[in-house]
Image (cartoon, helix red, strand yellow):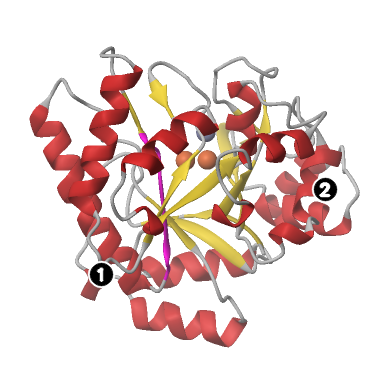
Amino acid sequence: MLGSHVGLSGKDQFLGSVKEALSYGADTFMVYTGAPQNTIRKSLSDMKIPEAKALMAESGIKEFVVHAPYIINLGNTVKPESFQFSVEFLREELRRTSEMGSRTLVLHPGAHVGEGEDAGITQIIRGINETLDPDTETHIALETMAGKGSELGKTFEQLARIYDGVIHNNKLRLCIDTCHLNDAGYNVKGDFEGVLAELERYFPINQIACIHLNDSKNEQGAAKDRHENIGFGSIGFDRLCAITRMKEFADTPIILETPYMSAEEGGKDRTYPPYREEIAMLRAGVFDPELHKKVVAYYKK
Ligand code: FE
Ligand code: FE
Ligand code: ZN
């Protein structure tokens, strides 16, 4: 399954998300339940969920994932009110995810904001334990992080420590992000098999519930987290394309979060989503160095 992140806004709401995914030729997608950088959310009854589900059923989209907003930080031990807010918001996100028809909510584990790895991980475990209960239907997929700032979850070992502390850890999953793995120091380009072998020291491979497929603007180990378009970064097309063809991931949503491409239009700089062309390129299995030109031409016509 191959798709990209899509928006959720305007009058079409979630129905618009499904339409956007279909316009890219995708058979899966990832969505935020509103703006990724804030926690203002519409009520479920205003999100056009039945309409979106009908369109998915009609067009053969069987699975999609939801991403929690970036500002949730379960690792915060400094501001108790921000931790409590994160816990409550995460509970609502799990409910929204399940109502929308997905079983996977992708979450950045958290950042320790200066208090150190141990304090941060303990707090993340506490937060997840306050969120999950035995009848939670949705899984939380912890995302592998680049290790920028005080981000936690940059190693499989750290993620395993979180799993270890979570009571209902049968409801946890992983989301591996190829750009983040590269930036965290894993050799995605040269030895992805080795990266998976390292992961398997801690987790069975079937814990991977989602893959974020991104190239990286930076070298292995840069701890930066700047995504690049497929084939234009330090990981390169061949590796990323090979991941989309691995039999282990035949039923895993593979999601592009590559940057929009910019071009001047009427004297203004505008940006265009590259996903339709990137998906086509990955499906064809041939790198297209003219991708930018194609994307811009498509949206200008
Ligand atoms: Fe993410
Ligand atoms: Fe990601
Ligand atoms: Zn990222």
Name the residue type under label 2: Ala
Picture coordinates of residue 283, whole percent (x, y):
82, 59
The first of marks 2 and 1 along the sequence is 1
Which residue position holds label 2? 242
SS for tag 2? helix
Identify the magenta region.
102-109
Which residue position holds label 1? 135
Q: Quadrant of the C terminus?
A: bottom right
Q: Residue 1 sits in which quadrant?
A: bottom right
Residue at left offset 78%, top offset 55%: 246
Q: Name above or below for residue 218 compared with residue 33.
A: above
71 or 141, nearer to the observer: 141
93 or 52, nearer to the observer: 93
Name the residue type under label 1: Asp
In the picture, measured across the screen, residue 188 lies left or right of residue 125, that is right
Picture coordinates of residue 133, whole percent (x, y):
22, 60
Q: Name above or below for residue 243 compared with residue 267.
A: below
Q: Is residue 269 visible?
A: yes
Q: Name above or below for residue 37 compared with residue 60.
A: above
Residue at left offset 73%, top offset 26%: 187
Determine crowd level at label 2: few under 14, some 14-19, many 20+ residues with C-alpha closer than 10 A. Answer: few
| C-alpha distance separating marks 2 and 1 | 37 Å
